[in-house]
Image (tube, rainbow, N blue to C red):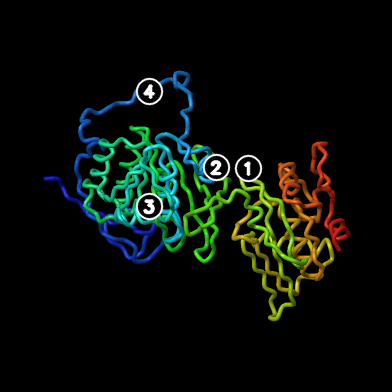
Amino acid sequence: MAKVKSSFFCQNCGAQFPKWAGKCTSCHEWNTIVEEIIQKEEKRNWKSSNSAKRVNKALQIHEISTLQEDRIHTNNHELNRVLGGGLVQGSVVLLGGEPGIGKSTLLLQIALLMKQKVLYVSGEESQSQIKLRAERLKGINPNCLILTETKTQNIFKTMEEIVPDVLVIDSIQTLHTDFIEASPGSISQIRETTAELIKFAKETNTPVVLIGHITKEGTIAGPKILEHMVDVVLQFEGDRNHTYRILRAQKNRFGSTAELGIYEMQSTGLREVTNPSEVLISEKDTDLTGTSIAATLEGMRPLMIEVQALVSTAVYGTPQRSSTGYNLKRLNMLLAVLEKRAGFRLGAKDVFLNIAGGLNVEDPAIDLAVVCAILSSNEDVAIPQNFCFAAEVGLSGEIRAVNRVEQRIIEAEKLGFEKIILSKFNKIPSKNHKIELIKVSKIEDVVKVLF
């Protein structure tokens, strides 16, 4: 009989302790340490029939083949862009997001669109429930197979029988293995089942996509090592009260983490937003004060976003500074620059800033748009709708150059803007643009142009 041993794990960070304690010394949370029974038993391979242990041979670096295998295209351009071109053979992708945001809908929709054979394993819904969702998504794919199972050994047995090209697990917190006698969703079970799936993916060269629940803090539930074990970590964000969803890559071993995918939630599923600039810029009949348009970049994709600002007299003694989608410290820095270098008295006024569309932008090229939106609200003078901005603002009030300005100009020109304000230090190729390029070097120059 196998020796049974119990250990104590923190349900918040996954730290292991020899005995119970009220406070976790790793993450300093209280009452998160729970006893879990671990059954010590020799771990067999995921493939029960393969009893022989295969030993990998060490190769010299020049002997290793560098031929890249073709990625599996998901027939979803937004997901392909975020992944870096598609699913890599043998990779493990972890998709996290809030409850009800659309994780299962996204992966089921992709499973119905793919030409390859996909096994969709659900531990949360029955096969009839998934069929109802598939009919709502208006997709019937004979290559999409549905399995409702939570035991990893049974999943691997099914995989040996049907040999799919892609495996989807919904969700990793519902799986359990025979090698550990802990409940599904516990730290030990999540770590062990993920390790088994990773070993299966690497040995069979089959891509595996996992759905992961998140905690109230917004992090993926389970041990932090879970995110280190997988190859790609995707975050599905958005407000359930709004229709738009944003897919980001927090970790990607096979591509960039700066890419962005935008979807719109409809009754028939998630629609890809191919031109997000038209979505992020609100339509209005007349010129409004406190709004400006910035040309920014998310990965390789240029975006035109709307910056909204409101400047009002402080009702209370201490002025308020509030920012949504933009770094609050950088906002305070820009306000100090306007006060010191441009002579605007904003120290006794409340300033509220918002990036329209729910985006969180870190590109410094929107600094000038933020400054102009604040000045527009303060002076109560509207910025013309045909103006846009792409420049960084320095501490001495100078307008600094930004990278890849050519892409920003082309995107602004494509959307019908007539003038773009840039730094005079930007080196722009001598290509004839239909849009007028206004080059400035200081904030005072921008104020003269606009106000």
Q: Earlier in the sequence, mark 2 or mark 3?
A: 2
Q: Which residue is mark 4?
A: 58
Is 83 rendered above or below residue 293?
A: above
Q: Nearer the viewer, mark 4 or mark 1?
A: 1
Q: Earlier in the sequence, mark 4 or mark 1?
A: 4
Q: Which residue is mark 2?
A: 81
Question: Which amino acid lies under the numbered mark 4 shown in the image of this protein?
Answer: Ala
Q: Which residue is mark 3?
A: 223
- The residue located at (78%, 49%) in the rendering is 400
Q: Are marks 2 and 1 in contact (CB under 8 Å)?
A: yes
Left or right? Give the position of 140 relative to 307.
left
SS for callout 2: helix
Residue 52 x %, y % = 22, 28
Residue 61 x %, y % = 46, 22
Q: Earlier in the sequence, mark 4 or mark 3?
A: 4
Residue 34 x %, y % = 29, 60
Gap in angstroms between the C-alphas marked 4 and 2 = 34 Å
Report crowding for label 2: few under 14, some 14 to 19, many 20 or more residues within 10 A (C-alpha): some
- The residue located at (17%, 50%) in the rendering is 4
Report crowding for label 3: few under 14, some 14 to 19, many 20 or more residues within 10 A (C-alpha): many
What label sits on residue 114 in the rendered view?
A: none
Is 123 rendered above or below residue 154?
A: below
